[in-house]
Image: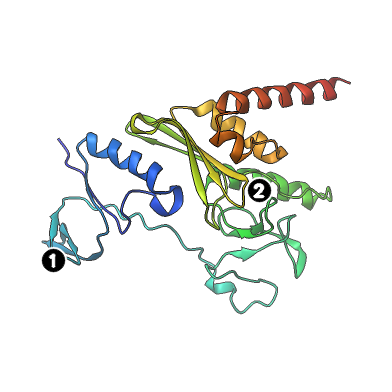
Amino acid sequence: AFRIRCSSQETVPFERVLGSRVGGSIKQLICSKGVRFYPQSKVVGFTSSRDRVTGVELASGEIIQADVVIVGIGSVPATKFLADQSEFALARDGAIVTDPLLRLPANPDVFVAGDIAAYPYVKTGELIRVEHWAVAMQQGRVAALNMLGHHVPFTQIPFFWSMIFGKGMRFAGWIGSGFDEVIIEGDIDKQQFVAYYVKDDRVTAVCTMGRDPVAVAAVELLEQNLMPSPGELRQGLKNSQDVLAIAKETAATKTVKRLV
């Protein structure tokens, strides 16, 4: 049997991205499966013997015994070789800045797609970079259309998913600039919930566990600016069933328009 240990600088997993309540639910899940979580811990080195890793050393002095170490600390675009090229504007993290058509502002004949592209998010105008293959695939399609002169802005709502011990987590929207509040619907302790992320009194993102169809519907509503208001969600005037109903109605309307 494997013993899994997880070290993090956060109090709970994904705290910075998903908030303490959703992160706490994920921590509860992984710990219930035997994972030992080391919160607010900093890795300072590794121990080894005969060219093989034997442990992870924490700033506290504790050494976590290990046969295999997986380091998950994100990624950095490998674009340093472009730093001296005047046509390429690089963001602070090294991403290549594009316009809404995924072109270089200084050279509209050069297109950029994937997780090296920092593009204007359609809902806020802020430059964002998404590290998910689904977004990269769609950006490739949009870039190709623009190469053919169709003038199609990239307006997709970011969406990603993951599986955690058989529990599906889905996320739609963008909260890179932070959030003011998280409204929870459902049983967060059992990983059966919908979390609505609120910024400036507007729902800007949705995270679900055990409620996959709601996350898919949220993509449509976020795109069309049809999400229930935070006030309606807080007071229980609207909930995820309304999200599903509105998405279904919107899809039916689109079908009718195509037929007409």
The N terminus - image quarter = top left
Q: Position of residue 142 (x, y in %)?
A: 72, 47
In this view of the protein, which residue sits in the foreground, 27 or 144?
27
Q: Is residue 99 left or right of residue 193?
A: right
Nearest the camera: 20 or 124?
A: 20
Q: Quadrant of the C terminus?
A: top right
Count residues near mark 1 (Cα–Cα under 10 Å), then give few for <14, some for 14-19, many for 20+. Answer: few
Residue to which mark 1 is pinned:
61
Q: How many marks?
A: 2
Asked whether 237 or 163 is in front, the reply is 237
Residue at 61% from the left image edge and 30% from the top image edge: 217
Foreground label between 2 and 1: 1
Across and down, in percent, residue 62 comes to 13, 61
The residue located at (13%, 66%) in the rendering is 61
Q: Residue at x 38, y 48 (%)?
A: 20
- Residue closest to the far right: 260
Pinpoint residue 102: horizontal percent, then vertical percent. Answer: 71, 56
| Name of the residue lying farthest toward the bottom | 84
Say which amino acid is labelled 2. Answer: Gln
Pointer 2 or 1: first along the chain: 1
Q: Which numbered dot is residue 139?
A: 2
Where in the figure is residue 72, as x and y percent of width and height?
35, 54
